[in-house]
Amino acid sequence: MAGSNDSDGAERDGQEPGPLIITEDENLLDDLLRLCAAAGTVPVVAHGGGARAAGWDSAPLVIVGEDCVHRLRGLARRSGVVLVGQHRDDTRVWQQAVEIGAEKVLGLPDGESWLVDRIADAVEGDGGPALTVGVLGGRGGSGASTLACALAVTAARQGHRTILIDTDPLGGGLDVLLGGEREKGLRWPAFAESRGRVGGGALAESLPRLHALRVLSWDRGDSVTIPPQAMRAVMSAARRRGGVVVVDLPRRFDGAVAEALTQIDVGLLLVPADLRATVAAQRVAAPARSLLRDLRVVARETPGPGLPDTEPARLLALPPVGTLPWDPHLADSFARGLPPGADPRGPLSRFCTEFWTRVLDRPGAQAPRPGCGGTGAAGGQPEDHGAPGAVVARPCESVQEGRS
């Protein structure tokens, strides 16, 4: 029978601690183990021992069968207790719920969907959702995938829990760009049939780990169409895990990409500072801004004559983030096997470091305010703007000085 016993810890192999199950009903236990597996966690099962010793005080959630309510007498009340009863119409079951301080009484199979969600919520914690940044190119070859990888690598290097999601099946795979195409782990085709709830921890553990971050990319097979429901499930799971999610977006939107856009906090439109690229970016910006709550422009320097850095944002009528300097050594870094953003002294890494510092490293800052021209804090709270230091990547004045 699956599940850990009284003496086993649930925090194995980096997993979050699972719920505590207290029942001696074998059929009910099998059902509860199945639901825990659906939520992406392994529970602790109190087999005949004391509930306190099994983790009554520390478990994120306690699921009690009505056959074992008597084992809880004398224990201190705690939150997060669910009573599973097969006779919910019996007043004694409700009396038992009051006796143990249960938050809910449910029966199976009717309550299965609710219980899977409740288990996943308890295991993943109640922290805020991940700050989710989407990157798309104003035209082909603008370097959006490179910037997305560099943002993810930099966030992970700063100690943020990071997932990089590749939503472009024709882009060749971000795992290749990061040098991890042979790394073990699941790719997008494994999630094409996902529906409903996907556990955030289970998702992360299943993905390749590259440069201290998790990467969801494509395999080398034929392109796979990802249904919007699968994109919704995967994006929601990644966001519930907290930290940072970076999404590399294609320039053409289907239903799945539209679903991803609705879950992005801030979009970065990378536009080379020349007229042709800015004209091309208008066709990308129009549908993107209808779905994104917050779309901003990153101007990229070009090696030859071009527009002033401020012109792409002005012509597109979008708030600027800053200017990404031209890096003549980027190709050499790739040839040496370095991922984008790996060199902390390079202009790409310094741009990303400045971006995350503005967004994440201020006290209380979690996410930009939707529709704000500057980089703000979550929930509409004003950002704590300190004195800007030397800004190598030249963020725009509105970000640097905190004006929206």
Image: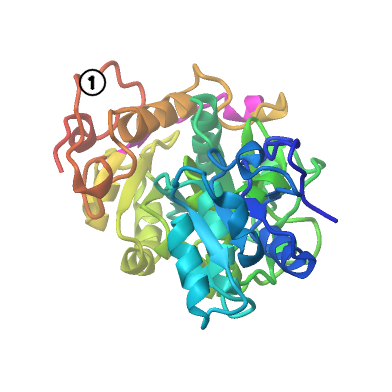
Quick check: is 332 in the magenta stretch?
yes
* Residue 401 in the image, given as x and y percentages of width and height: 16, 30
- Looking at the image, residue 215 sits to the left or right of residue 404; the answer is right
Q: Residue at x 17, y 34 (%)?
A: 402
Q: From this view, report whether residue 35 is shown above or below residue 72.
A: below
Which amino acid, mark 1? Pro
Which residue of the protein is positioned furthest toward the right in this rendering? 1
Give the structural element (helix, strand or loop) at label 1.
loop
> Which quarter of the figure is the N terminus placed in?
bottom right
Residue segment shown in magenta = 322-333
Quarter occupied by residue 39: bottom right
Q: From this view, report whether residue 146 is shown above or below residue 331.
A: below
* Residue 63 in the image, given as x and y percentages of width and height: 59, 58
Q: Using the image as rendered, state which of residue 9 and residue 264 is in the foreground.
A: 9
Residue 297 visible in the picture: yes
Q: Which residue is drawn at 82% across and 54% down?
A: 2
Q: From this view, report whether residue 110 is shown above or below residue 314.
A: below
- Looking at the image, residue 315 sits to the left or right of residue 76; the answer is left
Q: Which residue is drawn at 53% across and 36% down?
A: 161
> Which quarter of the figure is the C terminus placed in?
top left
Total labels: the figure holds 1
* Residue 70 in the image, given as x and y percentages of width and height: 60, 56
Quick check: is 361 in the magenta stretch?
no
Quarter occupied by residue 153: top right
* Residue 47 in the image, given as x and y percentages of width and height: 76, 49
Q: Mark 1 points at which residue?
A: 388
- Looking at the image, residue 26 sits to the left or right of residue 147; the answer is right
Q: Residue at x 64, y 45 (%)?
A: 215
Neighbor class of circle 1 (other Cα within 10 Å; few <14, some 14-19, many 20+) is few
Q: Using the image as rendered, state which of residue 71 and residue 118 is in the foreground.
A: 71
